[in-house]
Image: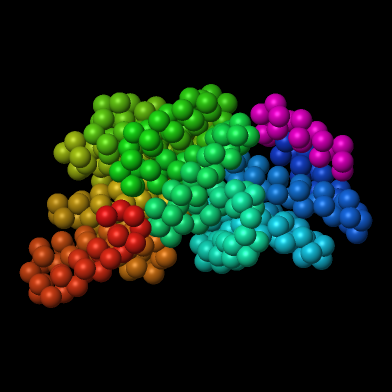
Amino acid sequence: AQINNRLAQVALENHSHIEALKYSRRALIQLGSNLGSRGNDSLFISAALELSNLAVSLGKYLNEMPQILEKAKGISNRLGDKRSTALLELHMGRVYFFSNNLSKALEFFALGEMAVKNLGDDDILEQASQFLALYHHTKGNFGKAMEYFELALIRLGSQKVNALADPSSVIYMGLTSAYLGQFQRAIGLLDFNWRLTKGHSPVSPIIRAILGTVLVVSGNRENGSFHLQMAHKEALSDRNFLGEYFAVGGLAYYHLIENRPNESRDMLTQLQARAIKHGMLGRFWSPWTLEMLFELEKLGYTPIPGYEFENLMSVIMDTPNAHLRGLALRLNAEKKLHQGISMDSIEKDLLASETLLKSTGDL
């Protein structure tokens, strides 16, 4: 087990993440039947945390991670290791987030945040920062998320860690910056990390698709559409559906603002069918997606099954994402205005929307 764990560390240092994943998983399997000594117990915890990072980065073995992390948490509780317990809860939150189990993700993120606050030292806060950033991004609290992303970026930079090892921080910090209107910062971060991962990482087309979308939204449509088209091509070539998902969504938005709503709707209709096949319908909603679907319905297009604004409104209002709820209420107020519904109802939605958006740092 110790040899495999060392081989995993060497592979990581050489940026051979697939190899690191293989050796880390092998070490954990060997350690699982040899627990009880302080050394093996501690090694199991550290190996579980490392495997969690690799599983999320590479999108592999996510279904195995909850059981592994739960076992590691039991060991840390037995050892009285509160720092590891806090980190394991945050790792579990992240694994559940990427496994599309939002309620479980929020439960473990909240437990981890409370444990980190109770420990109350700077070192554990720095280690937890990337997870807490994702937690607050998920809740739509972008101002707070950005504070944690800032801390994570300092820590990741000091360790020379980047999107090759931690794609979620790069992707979600880029999105958070864009949602706050900090487009140049978002573009700089995404462009740097896309170039870093280009050609040798499955996350490359995902980052490129998000970069293209942010460029389009910020007004640089020509450059943005080029990146989106290339990201789409790369994702199809690599059979990377998540990259395809983001690229098609960005291209649909581009066609809509270029006054080509037919093309936009056609792309979203095709994407919807693919999303159902891959079990991703309703995942990774963004404000831009919601606005796009609303505009298409406003133009008189038949709602896309599964993407109907009325249904999305109900779903979003049940989520913890304050930013999406605020936007949904604002769009709903606009819809009511076109329908001739009473001003009292419209003003109620607008006031609730303003309160929510202010709470997220967006107003």
Which one is in front, 70 or 257?
Answer: 70
Applied colour scheme: rainbow
Residue at left 80%, top 43%? 26
Q: Is residue 188 visible?
A: yes
Q: Position of residue 28 (x, y in %)?
A: 80, 48
Magenta segment: does it hold 12? yes
Q: How many marks?
A: 0
Q: Is residue 91 visible?
A: no
Does 168 appear above or below 110? above
Q: Position of residue 317 (x, y in %)?
A: 34, 68
Q: Looking at the image, which residue sits at the far left?
A: 340
Magenta segment: does it hold 159? no
Say whether residue 194 is left or right of residue 38.
left
Say whether residue 346 is left or right of residue 116.
left
Residue at left 88%, top 51%? 40
Q: Quadrant of residue 96?
A: bottom right
Which one is in front, 281 or 163?
Answer: 163
Q: Quadrant of the N terminus?
A: top right
Which one is in front, 179 or 203?
Answer: 179
Say whether residue 264 is left or right of residue 346.
right
Does 70 appear above or below 252? below
Residue at left 16%, top 74%? 345
Q: Position of residue 328 (x, y in %)?
A: 27, 61
Magenta-highlighted residues? 1-18
Residue at left 15%, top 70%? 347
Q: Quadrant of residue 19?
A: top right
Q: Quadrant of residue 228?
A: top left
Say whether residue 109 is left or right of residue 322.
right
Q: Position of residue 316 (x, y in %)?
A: 36, 64
Q: Quadrant of the C terminus?
A: bottom left
User: What main secondary structure does the magenta stretch of the protein show?
Assistant: helix
Q: Looking at the image, which residue sits at the far front?
A: 121
